[in-house]
Image: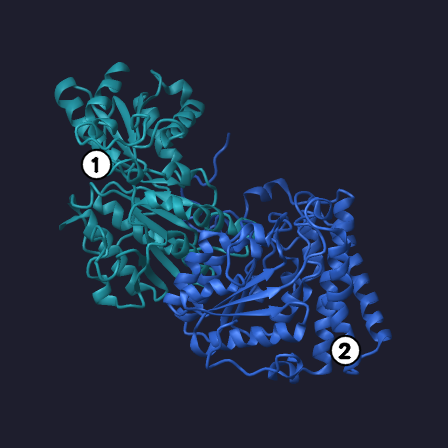
Chain colours: A blue, B cyan
């Protein structure tokens, strides 16, 4: 069982819509949440189409199926709250407000991409939106998330860092080192384990030793932890809000494990259903646990909207996604000269330091 | 000009930068209450307190990565590795995060961090504690690396490293911490990427960095006294950025070069310098470029043997005499 604490906000264990953070949502905000989830899904569906046509290189790790996690958590962010994640990063990027154009262009390696074509799918960044990537090495971002929290505390700001990771990252040493430091120094970081049950093609039971769940390991560090059902957007928000409050009010870390599921493979290049899971498992999730389908059902039940209005929104978002592909395809490739840009700040800014000594070497 | 130790020069640089910029924070194992494993940070915790001088657990990947993350929000962490040999447990953080995040973000992020500590053999602590990874760091575009050889350089380079807006690795040397040099009382900085002629000469150029500069200076004295050879000693000081112009200038002056390097020979810093001299000064050379490196095996413990594994004045003299 999750370890309860005095600062825990009481929430109805069945219906998280009554949690304060959800009860106060306006109809517009609820529709905004739907919009963000649909943007992720439609963006990625279009990206998949172009990936399969050979328009982009490398890997494409799709987030489809997990949308309620990124959107639910990010919907709570304030001015001094920051986000960092791993390589399955499109969802968080769009959730923090990045445009589809710059994201799609990055997938195609274009100069107009959010990282000027230098990062690709795994490396989206938007520091102006408190979004710090987009990191390719499993677990490698966990100390960076801690550093964001350290920076906030050092500056005396009331904020927190949401550091996302997959269930495959929990066995990396850097994560455990981060948990120790987070607890030791009381840093306002929330580690969010998006447990989609598979670390690439290896099931949870074949990769991670645990008593009851992955988050429970935090007990060993004296860190409060919790688990959430990632298909229920209200639950995601309620439990993330608790963790964020703990960070804001007490400057304490939390580990929050959110159960979720990805419909596609680890990356598109992955054998997915053919090798390590059954096709009917995926179908079962799509039919009964899909976060967008469930949110739409909620909105109808609550009388917030109509099917027609949601369909109209979806159509609009499909247009946006297709337009982003047009934008990306029409964009220029980065220039060969740009290979040597964005390596050193001092060189890019043509400072005296950047102009002293040789920074780049020929063959 | 007062004589102060390499250790004190670093200590003064750190203290001055802590006072100059409220975002500078020292982090590392034993840097605060213990006063530093090698006493480089002695007295700083007492002077500046818990916020500015922070003891970390033995957790290099964790605290180095944390410092990198904090630097993205404008903190300027100066992180001590008790030995640069311990960097390997934080390698992903140093190479992938500090080294690549600016590029991966298309220039949206920069990491103004310093990672510092000793990187040397010669103290009988065995192979795991005797690494000299400046060549590895220099092989990573996005990172900078400096190897000061004197107290004067250590202070000036450290202050510049802290003010630099890119990640800078400062490789110190435990065998130099207790050595003294003249250091001015007034403030000064030394730019990265500027080499320094430590001894003027005409017959051969001994090109080195870090403690190898001191070894080269000793060799130069013996060459002058016993062989009538006037060697110039060029101290690279900074490996990346590199003062290529100073290298070519001294080679064009003496027409002979012996590169002295405590790296292992294969893909060591001197291998790069040698290639550059060959490409740019081929017609100026009167003899093949020579190299004196650490002997190509893991650092041996034996106190009887370790001194000869590192470049010695005798080996420098022998290589010099081969081409003169």
Q: Vertically, is A18 above or below B305?
A: below
Q: Are marks 2 and 1 in contact (CB under 8 Å)?
A: no
| Residue A182 falls in image quadrant | bottom left
**Letter of the chain that mark 2 sits on in the rendering:** A
| Residue under label 1 | B124
Q: Which residue is found at the position 26% from the left and 19% from the top?
A: B319
Query: Image height check: is A280 above or below A221?
Result: above
* Image spot of residue B304 (x, y percent): 17, 28
Residue at the outermost right position: A308
Instruction: Read off the residue under disc 2.
Output: A299
**Residue closer to the observer: B323 or A231:** A231
Check disc 1: other Cα within 10 Å, few if <14, some if 14-19, many if 20+: some
Going 26% across and 55% down the picture, which residue do you hit?
B13
- Closest to the observer: A312 or B5? A312
User: What chain is tagged by disc 1?
Assistant: B
Q: Please indicate whether residue A71 sits to the left or right of residue A226 in the image.
A: right
Is residue A140 visible from the viewing direction of this image?
no
């Amino acid at each position: 069982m999750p370890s309860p604490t005095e600062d825990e906000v009481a929430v109805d264990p069945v219906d998280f819509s009554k949690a304060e953070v959800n009860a106060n949502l306006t109809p517009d905000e609820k529709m905004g949440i739907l919009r963000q989830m649909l943007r992720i899904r439609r963006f990625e569906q279009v990206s998949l189409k172009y990936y399969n046509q050979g328009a982009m290189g490398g890997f494409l790790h799709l987030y489809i199926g997990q949308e309620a996690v990124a959107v639910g958590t990010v919907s709570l962010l304030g001015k001094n709250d920051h986000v960092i994640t791993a390589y399955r990063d499109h969802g968080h990027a769009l959730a923090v407000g990045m445009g589809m154009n710059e994201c799609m262009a990055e997938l195609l390696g274009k100069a107009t991409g959010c990282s000027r074509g230098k990062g690709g799918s795994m490396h989206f960044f938007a520091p102006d939106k408190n979004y710090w990537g987009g990191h390719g090495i499993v677990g490698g971002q966990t100390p960076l998330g801690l550093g964001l929290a350290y920076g906030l505390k050092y500056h005396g700001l009331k904020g927190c860092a949401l550091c996302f990771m997959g269930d495959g990252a929990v066995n990396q040493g850097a994560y455990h080192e981060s948990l120790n430091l987070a607890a030791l120094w009381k840093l306002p970081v929330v580690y969010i384990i998006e447990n989609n049950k598979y670390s690439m093609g290896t099931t949870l039971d074949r990769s991670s030793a645990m008593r009851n769940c992955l988050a429970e390991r935090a007990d060993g560090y004296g860190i409060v932890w919790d688990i959430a059902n990632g298909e229920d957007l209200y639950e995601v928000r309620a439990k993330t809000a608790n963790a964020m409050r703990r960070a804001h009010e007490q400057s304490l870390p939390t580990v929050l494990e959110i159960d979720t599921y990805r419909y596609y493979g680890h990356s598109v290049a992955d054998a997915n259903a053919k090798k390590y899971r059954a096709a009917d498992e995926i179908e079962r999730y799509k039919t009964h646990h899909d976060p967008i389908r469930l949110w739409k059902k909620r909105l109808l039940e609550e009388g917030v909207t109509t099917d027609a209005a949601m369909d109209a929104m979806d159509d609009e978002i499909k247009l946006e996604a297709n337009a982003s592909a047009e934008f990306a395809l029409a964009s220029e490739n980065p220039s060969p000269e740009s290979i040597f840009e964005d390596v050193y700040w001092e060189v890019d800014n043509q400072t005296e330091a950047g102009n002293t000594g040789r920074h780049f070497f020929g063959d | 000009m007062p004589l102060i130790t390499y250790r004190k020069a670093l200590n003064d640089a750190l203290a001055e930068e802590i006072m100059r910029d409220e975002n500078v924070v020292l982090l590392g194992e034993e840097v605060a209450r213990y006063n530093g494993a090698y006493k480089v940070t002695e007295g700083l915790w007492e002077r500046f307190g818990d916020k500015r001088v922070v003891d970390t657990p033995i957790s290099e990947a964790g605290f180095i990565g944390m410092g990198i993350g904090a630097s993205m929000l404008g903190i300027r962490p100066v992180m001590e590795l008790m030995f640069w040999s311990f960097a390997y447990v934080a390698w992903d953080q140093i190479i992938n995060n500090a080294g690549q995040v600016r590029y991966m973000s298309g220039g949206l992020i920069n990491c103004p961090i310093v990672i510092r500590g000793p990187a040397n053999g010669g103290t009988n602590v065995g192979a795991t504690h005797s690494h000299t990874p400046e060549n590895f760091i220099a092989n990573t575009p996005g990172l900078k690396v400096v190897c000061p050889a004197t107290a004067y350089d250590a202070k000036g380079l450290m202050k510049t490293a802290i003010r630099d807006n890119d990640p800078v690795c400062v490789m110190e040397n435990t065998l130099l911490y207790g050595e003294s040099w003249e250091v001015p009382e007034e403030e000064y900085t030394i730019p990265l990427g500027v080499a320094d002629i430590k001894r003027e000469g005409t017959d051969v150029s001994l090109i080195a960095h870090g403690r190898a500069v001191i070894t080269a200076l000793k060799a130069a004295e013996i060459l002058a006294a016993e062989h009538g050879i006037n060697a110039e000693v060029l101290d690279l000081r900074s490996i990346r950025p590199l003062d290529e112009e100073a290298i070519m200038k001294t080679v064009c002056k003496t027409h002979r070069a012996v590169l002295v390097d405590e790296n292992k020979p294969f893909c060591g810093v001197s291998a790069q310098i040698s290639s550059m001299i060959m490409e740019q000064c081929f017609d100026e050379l009167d003899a093949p470029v020579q190299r004196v490196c650490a002997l190509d095996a893991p650092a041996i413990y034996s106190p009887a043997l370790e001194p000869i594994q590192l470049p010695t004045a005798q080996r420098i003299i022998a290589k010099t005499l081969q081409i003169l």
